[in-house]
Image (cartoon, helix red, strand yellow):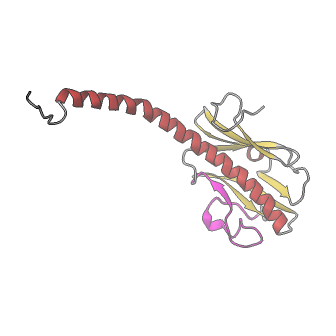
């Protein structure tokens, strides 16, 4: 009995393996792109949610009557800043940190479209109101009442942060938008 030693793959075996790999990649790339968009929008919403709680914490820590989240838009996109001087906070630029800080500490707090590529932001406070949410340092209602800020990428991927009149914040997916893993639908 002669012992035959295999020298490697045949050309046919290599072509079959490459075809199977190409099919896996063709299926995986769109799923990865959708997951990436969803996580970016979800990240923007959670960043705003955390900023709301940071504003409340800063108001209590510094014993300020209110701390404000100011919504701004610029040629390059959108931003929101946490400040105790909303009248002087007028720019999304990081050069405006002194005007948008709390108690003049020079720290810039908030988020912007620079942090979340291709994410749009719409807010009841920006479009229909004063462009600010004043957050008191104690448990009480919001002066501006309830409202929502929605982050989106395209028409289908959307996540909202809703502030209730009682000053509570929750994150949800608006009706009609694609579901987002780990985020409940708005009711």
Q: Nearer the viewer, residue 140 or 96?
A: 140
**Place of residue 183 in the rendered image (x, y in percent of width and height, measured from the top left):** 68, 38
Residue, far right: 140
Residue 10 shown left or right of residue 170 in the figure = left
Q: Nearer the viewer, residue 49 or 85?
A: 49
**Place of residue 47 in the rendered image (x, y in percent of width and height, measured from the top left):** 67, 52
In the rendered view, would you say 50 is above or below 158? below
Residue 125 shown left or right of residue 1 in the figure = right
User: From this viewpoint, is residue 80 visible?
Assistant: yes
User: From this viewpoint, is residue 124 visible?
Assistant: no
Residue 139 shown left or right of residue 43 in the figure = right
**Place of residue 11 in the rendered image (x, y in percent of width and height, measured from the top left):** 17, 29
Q: Residue at horizontal 82%, vertical 67%?
A: 61
Residue, far front: 1
| Magenta highlight range | 88-114
**Place of residue 70 in the rendered image (x, y in percent of width and height, measured from the top left):** 74, 56
Figure quadrant of the N terminus: top left
In the rendered view, would you say 8 is above or below 116? above
Q: Nearer the viewer, residue 151 or 18?
A: 18
Residue, far bottom: 105
Q: Residue at horizontal 58%, vertical 43%?
A: 39
Residue, far left: 2
Residue 132 forms part of the magenta stretch: no
Q: Residue at horizontal 72%, vertical 32%?
A: 185
Q: Quadrant of residue 20?
A: top left
């Amino acid at each position: 009995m002669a012992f035959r030693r295999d020298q490697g793959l045949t050309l046919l075996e290599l072509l079959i393996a490459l075809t199977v790999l190409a099919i896996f990649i063709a299926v995986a790339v769109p799923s990865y792109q959708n997951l990436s968009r969803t996580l970016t929008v979800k990240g923007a919403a959670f960043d705003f949610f955390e900023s709301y709680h940071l504003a409340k914490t800063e108001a209590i820590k510094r014993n300020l009557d209110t701390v404000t989240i100011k919504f701004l838009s610029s040629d390059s996109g959108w931003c929101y800043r946490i400040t105790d001087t909303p009248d002087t906070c007028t720019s999304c630029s990081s050069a405006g940190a002194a005007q948008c800080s709390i108690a003049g500490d020079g720290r810039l707090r908030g988020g912007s479209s620079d942090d979340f590529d291709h994410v749009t932001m719409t807010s009841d406070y920006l479009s229909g109101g004063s462009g600010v949410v004043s957050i008191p340092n104690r448990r009480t209602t919001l002066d501006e009442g309830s409202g929502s800020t929605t982050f989106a990428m395209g028409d289908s991927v959307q996540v909202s942060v809703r502030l209730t009149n009682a000053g509570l914040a929750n994150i949800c997916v608006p009706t009609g938008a694609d579901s987002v893993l780990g985020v409940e639908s708005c009711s």
